[in-house]
Amino acid sequence: MKYAEIKREWGNYYRGISSHCVSRPFNPLKKEMDAFAEANPGLSPMMLKAGQYEIIADKFIPVLLPHNPFFFETGLKMAEYDGRVDLSSGGWLYLRNVALYSDSPEKAADYRRYCYGDLIGLHLSYGPYYDYDHHCFPFSNMLELGLSGILKRLEEGHAGNTEPEKAEFYEAARRGILAVRKIAEKFAAAAEEKLASAESPEERKNLERIRTAARRIPWNPPQTFYEGLECLWFFHELGSVLDGIGMSVLGSPDRQLIRLYRRDIQEKRLTEAEAYELICLYMLQTDSKLDFDRPIEGQFNAGEQGDTLILGGLDESGNDVTNELTFLFLKAHRELKLTYPKIHIRFSSRTPAVLFQEAAKDFLADRNVLSFLNDDIVIPSQIMAGKTPESAARYVAGGCWENILEGYEHSQGANSYFSLGKCVDLSIHEENEDEKSLELPFRKLDGATSFEGVYSIVMDNIKLALHQLFSIQQKYGALWTQVNPCPFFSACLNGCAESGRDYSAGGACYSPHGIPFTGVAVLVDSLLALKTICFGENPVPLPRLLAVIRNDWRDAEALRCRAMASPHLGDGKGEAARLTARILNDLADYVAGFRNELGGIYQCGLYSYRDIIDWAKVTRATPDGRRAGDFLSQGLTPARTHADAVTQVFSDTASLPLLRFPANSVLTLSLSKNGLTEALLSGFLKAWVLVRGSGMLQLNCISREELEDAQKNPQNHASLIVRLYGYSAKFITLSEEKQREFISRNIY
Amino acid sequence: MTAADTKIFDIGHFSVHDGPGIRTTVFLKGCPLRCLWCHNPESQSEKSEIFFTPSRCVGCGACFTVCPASCHRMENKMHLFDRKRCTQCGICAANCPAGALELCGRHLSPEEVMAEVLKDRVFYETSGGGMTVSGGEPLAHFDYLFHLLSLARKEKIHTCVETSGYASFEHIRALIPLVSLWLWDFKASEADHRRLTGVEAERIRGNLRKLDACGAPLVLRCPWIPEINDSSAYSEELLEISAELKSVRRIEIEPYQPLGEDKYKRLGRPLLCEAKFPSKKASGDYLKFLQNRTNIPVVEG
């Protein structure tokens, strides 16, 4: 059967549990779970979670998809699941307890204040307080130890424990592990039952495979390449169903499974063709869940799915792991024309040239689907953040870009997006009612008499808003462990079994919170425009310029042009880069003074999600010439109003203290396809690595003419896929606003 | 012209059209040819010029007050620029906030240019690129060019010179050790050459043969402008000379792009010819036609 037909067939199943067919919150086991809670009043959240695990294991009905050699589908997660708690049975405990965040007037007031940050475009509360998505299941531990090994580690931790709270964690984690064992056994039994009536050799082969594997793994570590792949997918799916937090990452299969693959090949249990077929089926599973031809405006979650696959990169000894599996996964993604899973390729100065070349191929075929991580920045940035080299080498990007050390920590990279551009706005404009509800005394720039005065006021305002954000998080973040402890996930992480504490209580090796800053260029360019216009040659009085900005630059085109012609991030002339470095160092210094409620660090990042559109609507005019509502700049990316060369952009970004931004530093660039070849593009990618242009690169190779034609004649551009803000989508399915945002980006 | 007089009208970073790999292209101002299809009209004069883009003018009046020759005035809300009085001093452009007035052409020393070129060194190393000197006609600035290419050689940077070949061969010979690859324009048939470019083909073809005899690696770059230079004689002469020469690595066909039309308006000059933009199919067919008759790779440039 052809892959396209298989995908369609699986898609038919997922359409039955998609947002178009079922209501939210989606939890087929809600009645049983509620009844359990009623029958056991007074149970702690930890023990309620243990009950949740067991109900799921008892009640779920295994779904074995046709033509699929993998077992994982419980029917308890919506097709569009993206980590949200109301889209799977796993979110039951969270939804039951979330009221804890606002069950007193003080809590409710703070909760509102925190959430208003999003409404006014200042900071994002994805959680609240905690990110429930973008996690990575500790695959490496599971592949090495199996569930039995995890249980053993847990029992060893429990052996010396005398604290009742820790005992609860051990007990809940143990019950979680046994529930997962039961889930696998139920899949084995279902395969056995189906075998009785299965006729086709293909179906029989798949069912026999599942029956055998599900009796062995995940209780025991996988012994074959097939079992390894199964483990990755099983825990990617089950992690979310059981604990109600999104497991975005599908693993780093080339580094994690190469030993099993090579042994299978050597012992003639597997051929490369058979491995490729397994990889194709594995990859199809993500893509089959969403309909990528549906217009995105009307589609739940804007057509995005978080699932991420990581390939390549350095190991703990500093050796490049690129191997034959790396290329098989890339080949499958390309040949099947997949949009998902998202593939992040880890590059470094040691990456072989052939991987750069392979990566370049997709972009020249209208497939802007890959993104790139720079080990030479990310690994040292993690080490600088106090983590061991061994753990740093295991980093992955959860979802779009949120760096996580697989097996050592949870994700916190997407919960607290913070807009530097909005802080510029609030340093100039009078607050409206929504903004006033933050109760923050933002100082205005009117009194400044020098550029240093301007800088201090804006930075003080940024610090003021950050301080409030951190304070509220510190105050209520600790509630997370009462809202949604995750003892099963935690038991699989390094550190929790030893400490006897859930990850939500700080039990894992590391407990960071992320603080990704967005709109760096708005801030830098605004400060430089103020410096040039008000404190440079032929100065304009600051109050006059502020009045013009407050009037949204109306009737002041000459001044606006002057603002836009001022030095700016990406011009490669040095001044903007120096100011950006100063700002980034000041931000990192300030953030370093805080510890989160778990005792962990706040780790800075530079990236932006859809807030470049959504927050732009509530960000008024800024001194860089941006009018109210104009799109914001993305992550570390320069503003879209300048026409510099891409080499000048790298010249600026490479000089920045990006090692102080371990959460990630993302540059989003569009190159003109005109004249680009595979060799040129691979050379470009390698140059990005060598100059250390950023921690991550989101790349598009496009032509403006093609995009404009795609707007007019969409039928001719059905296969054009573009990289947006952490994910890719078909251009013609985007809303008019999203298309406009994409087209307005600089094309270098 | 002395090296001190040479003006640069652009330095193009991340250039992927002017030689192998990712390159930085340095455009020198001044050209003895006047090709009818020239898409860089600002490259022709050796002197600085003013680009004027009325649509960008915001009417601030800054240029009226600073221009020492009173070239700018406003009439009926229209910004009028009297080019006849303009001395190209550039003061108006320096004071124009909107980019409506731009000075084209400034002197930079070869050392200053090289400092800019070196910023992109890593891109050359990862892609097999380097520096290309274009124009205008770079050979019209021999002293400057020699100095610049010598600096590049010292830095071990791959160099290309894009030239019409209309120059003294002694100059060309002197540059041979400094040029990694010559991008040699093959613009028109002998019969049409003077009419279409303003100069005879004889000197250019002679230089080309001499350069080839020295073994210098060459790419022939051939503008292809339907109904202007695309005579059968043009194709035949191209095939003939490329068969005769020993050092031609590639033939690059450059279908006409209407890139320069706007620039003529901004310089206040009339277009020299109304050329047609060939379809992709027509370009592809022409490439195939040539490729069927030569063993040298023919590619679109």
Image (cartoon, coloured by chain):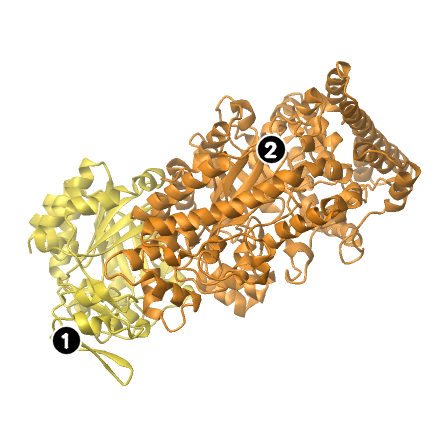
Chain colours: A orange, B yellow
Furthest-top residue in view?
A160
* Pick the front one: A615 or B43: A615
Residue identifier under label 2: A252
Q: Chain of mark 1?
A: B
Q: Say which amino acid is labelled 1.
A: Ser
Q: Chain of mark 2?
A: A
Q: Secondary structure at mark 1?
A: loop
* Quarter holding residue B264: bottom left
With A362 as the anchor, is A107 left or right in this view? Answer: right
Furthest-bottom residue in view?
B76
Residue identifier under label 1: B70
* Crowd class of label 1 (few under 14; some 14 to 19; many from 20; radius 10 Å): some
* Pick the front one: B180 or A164: A164
The location of residue B162, given as percent across then percent down, is 22, 53
The residue at 17%/69% (across/down) is: B66
The residue at 81%/55% (across/down) is: A22
- Give the Cα distance between marks 1 and 2: 68 Å
Q: Say which amino acid is labelled 2.
A: Ser
The residue at 18%/72% (across/down) is: B65
* Crowd class of label 2 (few under 14; some 14 to 19; many from 20; radius 10 Å): many
With A692 as the anchor, is A492 left or right in this view? Answer: right
Q: Secondary structure at mark 2?
A: loop
Question: For the N terminus of chain B, which image quadrant?
Answer: bottom left
